[in-house]
Image (tube, grey):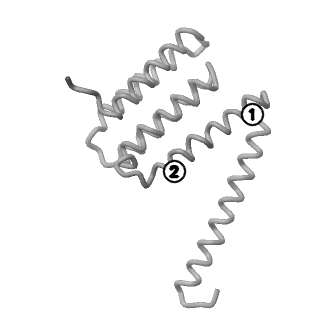
Amino acid sequence: MNSLSPDRQIILFMAAVVILVTAIHPTASWYLTLFLLALYVSVYWLTRTWHDRAFYLVCFGALLVVTCGAASIWEELIVAWMVGGSSAIAMGMTVSRNDLPALLALGSCTLAVALMIYLSNHVLLPLFVLSALTAGIAAVLAIRDYQFRKQCSGARV
């Protein structure tokens, strides 16, 4: 008996979730959700041998995630996890266990963001918090990059 590969299982599960939630909670843009799902699946199948497949999966998956957010934040979260999983498989991150902590961190951070948005009942406050956090991380990385360049050039740190 042939079993499906993990990436095909992820795509089938994502399609089932999107179709089921669209059928249960139809929104004004239900047709757009199904169209973008079909577009994502077609990009998934057409880019099987491309080297930059993960880029296309993330780009088309982001469109699908945003439209799924109109129905439910939890559908959006599940679809975001599925897009992240299929992109991780396309990048080869699931071959070894070294990248598993990064994938778990992605899942837990997106869950925390979804809970923050769900509990605050609006998006503006979590957006400010995430923007400040992102700016802080970018500042720390920029300072560390400057120190690394300075150290590699032979200057004292």
Above or below, 34 relative to 78: above
Taking the spot 43% from the left edge, 21% from the top edge, the residue there is: 15
Looking at the image, residue 31 sits to the left or right of residue 42; the answer is right
Above or below residue 68? Residue 84 is below
Report the residue at 72% width, 49% height from top. 131
C-alpha gap between disc 2 and disc 1: 25 Å
Residue 102 got which mark?
Answer: 2
Q: Nearer the viewer, residue 58 or 114?
A: 114
Report crowding for label 2: few under 14, some 14 to 19, many 20 or more residues within 10 A (C-alpha). few
Report the number of numbered marks. Answer: 2
Q: What mark, if any, has residue 36 been given in the picture?
A: none
Q: Residue at x 37, y 27 (%)?
A: 41
Badge 2 vs badge 1, beta-carbon distance below 8 Å: no
Could you tell me residue 65's position as x and y percent?
A: 54, 30
State which quarter of the image contains the N terminus.
Answer: top left
Q: Is residue 85 left or right of residue 22?
A: left
Label 1: few (<14), some (14–19) or many (≥20) C-alpha neighbours in 10 Å: few
Q: Give the x, y percent position of residue 27.
A: 61, 13
Q: Say above or below: 129 vs 124.
A: below
Q: SS of the residue at dot 2?
A: helix
Residue at 47%, 18% in the rendered image: 34
- The amino acid sitting under disc 1 is Val
Q: Quadrant of the C terminus?
A: bottom right
Lower sequence index among marks 2 and 1: 2
Percent coordinates x, y for residue 123 in the rendering: 74, 33
Mark 1 residue element = loop
Query: Nearest the camera: 105 or 143?
Result: 105
Disc ID at residue 123: 1
Specify the quadrant of the image occupied by residue 57: top left
